[in-house]
Image (cartoon, rainbow, N blue to C red):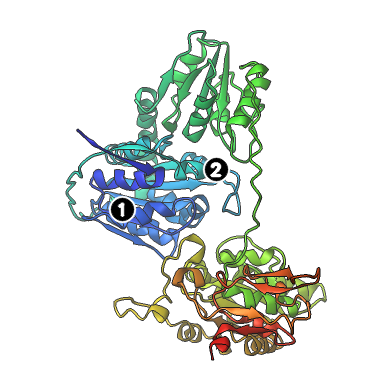
Amino acid sequence: MSKTAVMSVNQAIARGFWEAGGRVATSYPGSPTVQIMESLLDYPDMTSRWAINEKVALEVAIGASIAGARSLVSMKHVGVNIAADPLMTFTQVETVGGFVLVVGDDPGLSSSQNEQDTRFFTRFANIPLLEPSTAQEAKDYVDEALVISEQWGTPVIIRLTSTLCHSQGVVQLGQRRDEPVEGFNEDQARFCMLPPYSRDQQHFMQQRMAALRELSEVSPLQQYEESSNLRCLIITSGISYQHLQELGADVSILKLGMSYPLPVQRIGELAALHQQVIVLEELMPFVEDELKAAGLAVEGKRYFSFTGELTPDDIRTGLIQAGVIPSALTSAAEDSHVVGRTPILCAGCPHRPIFHILKQAQAVVIGDIGCYSLGILEPFEVLKTNLSMGASLGMIQGVALAQRMAGNVKPLVATIGDGTFFHSGLSGLADLVNTRENITLLILDNRTTAMTGGQMTPTTRDFVKDEDLTGINLPELLRAFGVEDVQVVNQFHYDKTRRIIVSAMEHQGLSVIIATRPCALNFKLRYPHYYVDSDLCISCRQCIAVNCPPISMRAEAGTEEKRSFIDPDMCVGCSVCSQVCPVKAIKSSRSQEV
């Protein structure tokens, strides 16, 4: 009897790669695909590793592939932007070892700055796209993608979405197959993409896509479920298929496992059997537009939103509007009364004193991507921009130039975390070092890629003191770049940090401040908790402004007057609230023991 296990789709992707004889897996952490690499790291007989960014991750996997190793790289949708440079040329190369790129899209922007649709990259790059809808399919599709990659000499994209990544299902477990690695065979015509070789590869891509179109027409990944009345055909894929199944609508369904290239001929034949054809897809009308361009009469975005996730209720409403199901089937989702929770920095987060200082200094702050993006929100509201990884270092120069043109010169501050700095900030720094503008760069070095689960960065070694880890010394690196004004601070020494930041803001030219406290959540730091001496508290709420979760206002017994209160079970003893208290009413519990 075969073994089974309940797995998330992310875990199933990892299992599928291991079973299929995968050899090299790389990734850069980004929700919703982080768990793929976290799971791969537990499997033996292959190499799995985090890379410094998505471009490097892709290039490592490309190198392994051209040397004959089955390779997989995973990332979130915006990571494909970073990896697009090598990807768009690698697609011309006839692959050797199977190559799979797993991408997690984020309809609804649950943890992303945009909602771009990776399906368009497959058409842009002339490579096939697979879209599983269950955990079992996710595992199976990895094997299928590797076979397609090797048989047709192409990279293959497997597209997931946030809800699908984290959904779970029963998965049949198999044994690992031994897939030998042939090693690198020198072939400049195959691997050197410059004229005249790359001109020939354009014809190879055209022939490859023609073969893949034929494959799409007959592939068992395209699953047709016929209704008895043949009134309506719904074409869908991924998680939308699962949501449609929940409605129990009496319709025919074509579930696309291979969404690009589309089986246009087969869809045309099925469409001719039905009175109405509707495309059910999240985000942009990728499939709908392809079919309309082929002359097929289909509808889709007329009934379904172009943005956000499509829930079963969204699908029900659209199908009622389209006349596919009667309104009598509608059943509004019960109000769960779940109280919304605004994202907040963790107790003891080292970013908190930095934001409090910047707010008090009324600094103009150009932000970046990471946990510290929460500095945009109340009560800090100090970050004024949030665009993409590493963008702060380039954007701040443009802002400074335009401000000078507008006759409104003022000090500017950029914030960037250590993970983001190494991901895509180094090139921005190289361009920034010669600035004559008044710019202060704050590198928030919390020794981890905190937003995505605490993966290591090149400065992690400085804190964990592991001799087996290699690391980069940030101050030495900055000076090697030519930065003269470099200062290192412990931001939990609040007053000293405030003086250094304010002084840097008054300095003409580039100043760099490295804030060194590590992530409290990842490193589980905890010191004696703090408490409020209610006899001294004047209810000024200066501690509340620090926005630390353990701090609240609580009414004293027998009175309606509120005083500050610190939950001792939540407090990690960072001491920032104590340092901002004007009357020294917040004290360490260590002093109670003395």
Q: Which mark is residue 115?
A: none
Q: Kindly identify the amino acid type of the residue bearing the numbered disc 2.
A: Asp
Q: Secondary structure at mark 1?
A: helix
| Residue 358 in the image: above or below residue 497 | above
Q: Quadrant of the C terminus?
A: bottom right
Q: Residue at x 28, y 55 (%)?
A: 24
**Earlier residue among tags 2 and 1:** 2
Q: Give whichever of 380, 423 is nearer the camera.
A: 380
Residue denoted by label 1: 191
| Residue 295 in the image: above or below residue 6 | above
Residue denoted by label 2: 117
Q: Residue at x 47, y 66 (%)?
A: 449
Percent across and percent down for residue 341 are 64, 55
| Residue 216 in the image: above or below residue 382 | above
Percent across and percent down for residue 335 are 66, 37
| Alpha carbon distance from label 2 to label 1 | 29 Å
User: Is residue 485 at all visible to an observer of this figure?
Assistant: yes
Count neighbours of disc 2 (C-alpha within 10 A) and say few if under 14, some if 14 to 19, many if 20 or more.
many
Q: Give whichever of 368, 509 is nearer the camera.
A: 368
